[in-house]
Amino acid sequence: MGKAFYLETFGCQMNVVDSERIVDLLEGIGYAQVDAAEKADLVLLNTCSVRDKAERKVYGHLGRFKPIKDRRPELIIGVGGCVAQQEGEKMLETVPYLDLVFGTHNIHRLPELVLQAEEKRRGSVTDFLDRETRLNLFPHRSVRDNVTRFVTVMQGCDNFCSYCIVPYVRGREVSRPSGEIKAEIEGLVAQGVREVTLLGQNVNSYGLKEDGELSFAELLNEVNQVAGLERLRFATSHPKDMTDELINCFGRLDKLCKHIHLPVQSGSDRILELMNRGYTAADYLRKVEGLKSVCPEIRLTTDIIVGFPGETEDDFLATLEMVEMVRYADAFTFLYSPRSGTKAAELQDDQSSVLKQERFERLCALQNRIGEEIWQQDLDKVLPVLVEGESKQGDGQLFGRTTWNRIVNFVGEKELIGMTVPVKIVKVFRNSNLGELI
Ligand code: 5AD
Ligand code: SF4
């Protein structure tokens, strides 16, 4: 009988893409994916270290697999992703039942590590690779009935925002050649993909460090021309690298969805400076105004950190003011958590966790009110929805998304998957809409 693997993925879309590659690699050495650790010969966690909570989860999860390994000592357990990159060899020492550790630049070496582990040899590879090697390793993954796909355009980050661990665990920025990106997208469309999201830690700086490469706005232009592609999105954008040329794309490119995720992190200039973000609140607002003027229907989402070291009530009020002014459709709000090795981890932080929690709740309450007002605008409207698949809700329901990236569930035939159909929004929930096919 063939062997089976169970894979769990944490964190951002980068990890989702890496996990797709992992699936391909493991299938290549005779493993088939299963949906529970109990049924597997190999268990893998693709991990995230961006915040403390994510990191602690990894150890908790590994603990869950220990009883299975006690019963079945031949079970192989492995860890990849950002926590693996950071901890490396140390993880093998602290977790005695762990067999293999692979870092963010070494996914291609997973098959070798698994084959070693089958022979009871534990292993860890977490070295960073040079630029040339990385350019050859941009993840190509097989398509499995996908309507939407992520396409990696750049990897790594050179921004060193003072709170952020990413530059340390993902390494320096490299941009993939635009010709290769276009070819991948053309190939995906030929296999039935209708929407692509161009992916990178900071897509706005795409190509800037490569001689003769297109700018990100030029890349969007090129991708917009791919015949058969219906929708185009990108993530994530850094406000400081958001050029007028890129802003104008939202008024010009017919396939570009009317949504942008533009992390603001804080509304206070003092905190933005301490965060090393490279823009002021006024700079950010100017870009938002630019976006809204070229594309009045655009909706924004954002990331905000509450409780950065030294944040005063005035700093926090500036963040609330930012939220009021931009009117985000949604925001991912985080309590600051120190990441060892980053600049911010050395800053004096004397606020109580009670105060931080209270601010966090005030921010969420404000954002929920604004988000709700924006989503309610869709009620009774007929909106184009790109149908992605069968809904988790069951009952013969399908799901798709509006241009604003909001999920719509509605009853319909499976033949509609991959098509853009008009759907009337009849109910608005916190995380999705309910619709009726027109
Ligand atoms: N503490 C809290 N939030 C963080 N983020 C990144 N690092 C930290 C940290 N140390 C948030 C930022 C980023 C998102 C992906 O995670 O808001 O945009
Ligand atoms: Fe982290 Fe800043 Fe890079 Fe985003 S831009 S990954 S927040 S360092």
Image (cartoon, grey):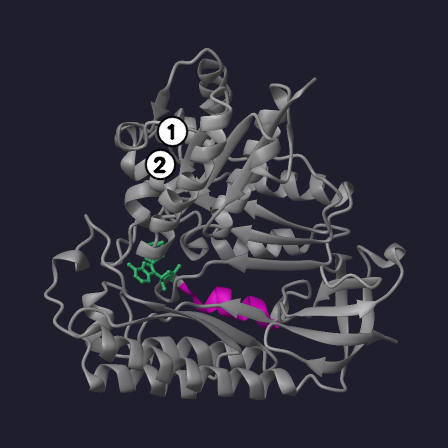
Say if 416 sits above or below 214 in the image. below
Whether 250 is among the magenta residues is yes
Residue 106: give x, y in percent of width and height.
41, 28
Residue type for callout 2: Ala
Residue 247: give x, y in percent of width and height.
50, 69
Residue 90: give x, y in percent of width and height.
25, 31
Is disc 2's CB within 8 Å of ligand 2? no
On the rendering, which quadrant does ligand 2 occupy?
Answer: bottom left
Say if 386 sits above or below 200 in the image. below
Q: Please indicate, yes or no, whether residue 144 appears anywhere in the rendered image.
A: yes
Return the mark for residue 84. 2
Of 187 and 179, the residue lying toward us: 187
Q: Earlier in the sequence, mark 2 or mark 1?
A: 2
Q: Quadrant of residue 126?
A: top left
Residue type for callout 1: Val
Q: Residue at x 40, y 40 (%)?
A: 63
| Mark 1, secondary structure of its residue | strand
Q: Residue at x 48, y 39 (%)?
A: 176
Q: Residues within 10 Å of mark 2 (few under 14, many from 20)?
A: many
Q: Magenta part of the protein: which range?
A: 242-251
Return the mark for residue 101. 1
Instruction: Tell whether 149 sits left or right of 312.
Output: right
